[in-house]
Amino acid sequence: MEFLLNFIERTGAKAAGWWSTTYGIVSFLTDVLSTITRHTTWNRATLDTIAKQIYFTAVQILHIYIIYVMAISWVIITITLSTARNVGLFDAATEMIIRVLLLELLPFLTALLIALRSGSAINTEVALMKVNNELDALSHCKVEPMQFEFLPRIAGGVISVIGLTVLGSVLTTILAYLSIYGMSATGFSTFSTTIATVFSVNILLGLAVKCTFFGLAVTTLPMAAGIETPKKLFMVPVSVLRGMMRVFLALVLIEVLSLALKYI
Amino acid sequence: MLTESVNSLSDEQTALVSLDLPLRANLSARENVALIPLYQKHFDAAESSRQAQALLDQLGFGAISDKRDPDMNPSERFVTKLARALILKRPQLVIERPGAMLYDIPYPAFLRGLAFRIENGPAKWEVFDFDWNRPLYD
Amino acid sequence: MFKNLHLKVGLFVITVLVLSLGFLLYVMHARGFFEQRQHLNLAAASADGISPGMALTFSGMPIGQVSSVNLNDAGGIVIKAEVSQDGARWLRVDSTFTLDKPLVGGAKIKVSSPNLSSPQLPDNSTVLLLVTDPTQEIPALIERVKNILANVEHITRQDGELNGALANVKTITGRMNGKYGVLEGMLGSEENARPVVASLKNLETLTKRLNDVSAKVDAMLAKTDRWLFAEDGLSEQSKQALAQVRAMLTDAQGSLKRVDALLKNAVDISANVKDGTQDLGKLRADIDEAVRKANDLISDINRMWPFSKDADMKLP
């Protein structure tokens, strides 16, 4: 009997925890939305901060990102081509490469890279701001941290995920063409036909939406986790751990949903 | 008792200088002060920066404007917080437990010196301090 | 601290914008947004296996794709296809359109224009889509497979040419190792070496014959290959049956090739022995080497081709 009661109590506590977390994230997102729609938000200072965030999130790692993307793309293109040759499905190789790399792998890996590098940094910073009372100080001064701390990071994150994915995709497309047809224009029309088959309007829109959600996930979830940190210094690592776990789950969820929408 | 009375002060009327309201750690002194004209009063970045610098100059600490919180000594940190409170232009200024922030100088004299430099500041300056520190102010 | 921050961010943003715009334009170009496309109506008895996006190819090059498959009011199939302006050059009034469903890979519609001097096919014309029915050809196909298998069995059966050749090799090596073997005789006089040389010469002719046989099998397999994969598609169970047949043929071919290589090796050894008779010391070394090699050969052959068992080719 007591065991049953304990069990019910624990389930209740867990559900309450989940509820408060979800509520926190949702209220944070509504806050973000209301800040975006306010026209006073979009002044020169905000744009400057967004530029700074894009610099930190995307431009600073551009060279590393390009090496990373080229290496992964090269390996996967080579494996796909040689397998396709062996199995006798060489005609399908281009489509396979485009579908796997451009539509799924590159956006996901980009989001993962930014989550690892910037998401964790954002989570730690916000958690420290919360623990150090800096957020309280700002609210006492009636300066919304949303406008100059959070929103620029979110905008920077979304723009960076989209921008890096575009760069990586273009590089991968070129690399794929060169791997399949070499330095000649002979395969161009065949290649274009495959590109045309894969990239319908829906797919392009879906890709843009997916990248936007990836960008939102890698920035808003760490921030929300940082804000809900209790005012105790030792809770900062716990907050980062929780935030990053949520980011990971969200990325997988977005990817699975996009695949389900595409192929089911 | 002390925190209660501080909490009872309304945000709208009172600018607070307190140990519990730290500076934004990754911004310089000038940027910390400039946040208020920039995001609350919607001045542009250059004008906000100029106002912040002018205030710091007036307090006699213009040289610290590029320092960030971790690089400041207690009086520099205090002055930046004071500048941030002053630029809010609220009718009442409350300095809470100055001894906790200015632990390495004879702070009542330091406060008087700063107050002397401020013209057309807030109508009312209030210092909340522990009762046993009263003799220091005489 | 961050000099040129705005410059770098600006460069990044502009590059990304230009690239996305470029990519978008490229995709629109690839999808034929900017060019006039020729429309084509394909009439077919059934839309089975036809889906929008399916490619139209001319000599293996894609020239267009199926844009929609619908039923009309009369219950007929209306397949609409679009062909690029460039590809439309190859469409003639006497072009044939065939639905091509290979065993592996996506189906496509093959366009062939036997007479390129015929007049061009006008826009929005309706043509007939041919769908070959492979199920009717399956009985004939099975008959031909049976013939091939019978041939293969003939080659590999117990008293067949292949086993004869292998038995010969065994005999030779047996003699070399035997109590009154060639090796012992070799130490005394070179007279006794002659039977070895003769045997090895014999082996050479055998190998030649075996080569011919395996060439024959190769030719047959090549034919089978062509014929298995040239057909337009097969029903599921015959597909499986054929895959099995093909696997067996490949196996048989592999074994024959391995035997062939080993026998060639034996021929080389015999040549060495012939040269060696001029120098007894060298000959002895050669013979030692030959015996060792032949022993290896025998164990190899035994491992790869079990003599004791029945021939492992069976009709399905």
Image (tube, rainbow, N blue to C red):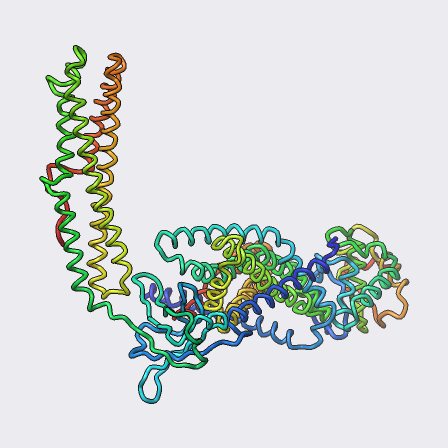
Taking depth in this image into account, of B115 and A148 the one nearest to the observer is A148
Q: Is residue A220 visible?
A: yes
Write the residue at 29% across / 79% down.
C45
Q: Judge by depth and name the residue closer to the eye, A17 or A202.
A: A202
Q: Is residue C295 left or right of residue C9?
A: left
Image quadrant in which you'd find residue C300: top left
Q: Position of residue B11 (x, y in %)?
A: 73, 72
In the displayed orientation, state which residue is furthest to the top: C188
Instruction: Judge from the rendering whether residue B41 lies leftward or rightward of residue A61; answer left or right.
Output: right
Residue at point 26%, 27% (across, down)? C268
Q: Residue furthest bottom?
A: C73
Residue at the spot x=23%, y=21% of the render?
C273
State how many labels appear: 0
Q: Is residue B59 above or below residue C48?
A: above
Percent position (x, y) of residue B97? 75, 60
Which quadrant holds residue C183?
top left
Image quadrant holding the C terminus of chain C, namely bottom left
- Examine the rendering and report whether any part of residue B6 can be seen: no
Decide if residue B69 is on the left or right side of residue A228: right
| Closer to us: C262 or A219 | C262
Q: Residue at x 17, y 34 (%)?
A: C206
